[in-house]
Amino acid sequence: MAAPNEVPAGVSRAFAVFGSEAPGHAAAWMQATRSLDEACALDPKTKDLAYIAILAALRMTTGVPFHVRQARDHGASRDEIVSAVLLGLEPAGHGVTACLPVALDAYDAP
């Protein structure tokens, strides 16, 4: 993982610090993440969109840019990103809208 001052596009500084300051924990986390990805029956784009919906419902804006870029790379449209963010409006409330500008900025970035 990159040093905290060399954060890759879309990766939060907090996650970069996690990787540099606790590399053993970060490696274990990434191994678990890869295993969960392999076990998932969803196609990559659908999984990315579902993940964005969950991040928005939990109001975890720092993870949104990275996962929006992944979804875009897997073929998600801007409208699909908007729909994913707003999917939780009914069960989670309007707090999901806090992720909307973050998501769209990430989608529109080069």
Image: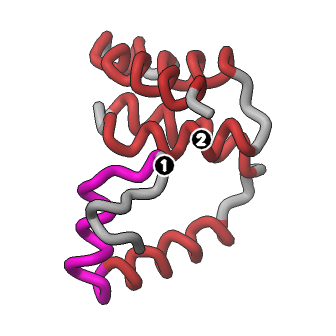
Q: Which quadrant, please, contains the C terminus? A: top right
Residue 89 placement, left or right of 72: left
Of 6 and 17, nearer the camera is 6
Image height check: is 82 above or below 14?
Answer: above
Q: Residue at x 79, y 36 (%)?
A: 75
Bounds of the magenta span?
10-25
Q: Residue at x 36, y 14 (%)?
A: 97
The numbered dot on residue 9 is: 1
Residue 38 placement, left or right of 66: right
Disc 2 vs disc 1: Cβ atoms closer than 8 Å? yes
Task: Specify the quadrant of the image occupied by residue 81.
Answer: top right
Q: Earlier in the sequence, mark 2 or mark 1?
A: 1
Of 17 and 48, nearer the camera is 17
Image height check: is 96 above or below 40?
Answer: above
Single out the residue that lies furthest toward the bottom: 24
Amino acid beneath label 1: Ala
Q: Position of residue 71 (x, y in %)?
A: 65, 40
Of 13 and 54, nearer the camera is 13
Amino acid beneath label 2: Arg
Provide the secondary structure element on which disc 2 rests.
helix
Q: Which residue is mark 2?
A: 69
Q: CA distance from mark 2 to mark 1?
A: 9 Å
Mark 2 closeness class: few <14, some 14–19, many ≥20 residues within 10 Å: many
Count of labels in the image: 2
Mark 1 closeness class: few <14, some 14–19, many ≥20 residues within 10 Å: few
User: What colour scheme governs how the chains and residues are painted in the rendered image of this protein?
Assistant: secondary structure
Q: Residue at x 41, y 14 (%)?
A: 89
Q: Position of residue 30 (x, y in %)?
A: 46, 75
